[in-house]
Amino acid sequence: MRASLRLAIPLGAALWLGSATAKAQTPGAVVGPIPAVVSAPASASPTGGPEPDAVLAPPAAPADPFSLPKLELSVGGGEGDWVGALRILGLMTLLTLAPGILLTMTAFTRIVIVLGFLRQAMGTMQAPPNQVLLALSLFMTVFIMQPVWSKVHEEALQPYMAGTISQQVAVELAVKPVRKFMFQHTRKKDLALFIKASGEGRPQTEADVATWQLIPAFIISEMKTAFQMGFMLYVPFLVLDMVVSAILMAMGMMMLPPVLISLPFKIMLFVLVDGWNLIVSSLIRSFNV
């Protein structure tokens, strides 16, 4: 133990003296984080050797590739600017509501309701799916309304694009063929209901009927016609369900759902009579096309 202490004491003294000597030789050294230095490869000097002091600065950061351009919207202080802004706002609102307005003023309502009744009467659940029924209803609407669109294009759109009529006149001319179509398929009883509810006097001619009175009357008339056609579709399938149910009860199979047995027979009956052709042709003829 004593021998160990004798060796440790001189060794510790020697280490302490060595560190003190190193600190005395570098009095200005400051301990801190070492900055990162990016050095490029040494370039050759005129004598052929590398230059010892060739140190390059860090490259500049590239421009942000995802920077967006600056957009500014300035509004003047004149009254005309506000009028133009309100017109644009009204036009955007009209474009948003235009699909719903046009669908309620066309043959779409009757067609989509009848096709929905057909699917329920057959009991095929989601076959055909809603997307197919809506697509068929939309294209049938375009086909049925083609004469009306042609008149609107010839009497209103073309003169307006040519600059021969104003915007207000173009709207009035475009509404006339659509109003004529709605008058042809609107019941007088339904039209009288909304005229009376509006509190206005009895109109003398069709031109005296406001469009906002005609549209709801046309919609409920279309719904009534569609429900009548839907009832006629239900009858043959209902009879088939009753026959299958009576047969199952006679066989003592009361726990078996009749719909499960009658569904294949409904599909077979619909295919044999070419049901889609009958339905589509009946819908087209109902609009006198």
Image: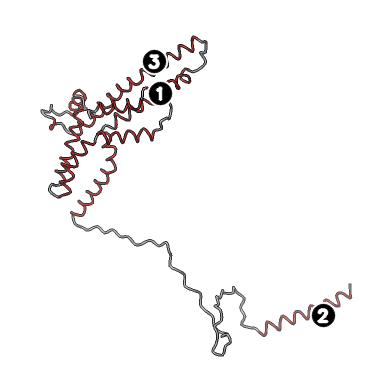
Hey, which quadrant is residue 214 in on the image?
top left
Amino acid beneath label 3: Val
Q: From the image, tell me which residue sits under label 3.
A: 239
Left or right: where 263 falls relative to 21: left
Q: Is residue 241 above or below residue 100?
A: above
Which of the marked residues, 1 or 3, is nearer the chain's N terminus? 1
Hey, which quadrant is residue 230 in on the image?
top left
In this rendered view, identify the residue nearer to me: 278 or 85. Answer: 278
Tags 2 and 3 touching, CB below 8 Å: no
**Discs 2/1, front:** 1
In this rendered view, identify the residue nearer to me: 40 or 248. Answer: 248
Q: Is residue 233 above or below residue 149?
A: above
Tags 1 and 3 touching, CB below 8 Å: no
Q: Is residue 261 above or below residue 209?
A: above
Left or right: where 36 falls relative to 277: right
Q: Identify the disc placed on residue 122.
A: 1
In this rendered view, identify the residue nearer to me: 219 or 37. Answer: 219
Q: From the image, tell me which residue sits under label 2.
A: 10
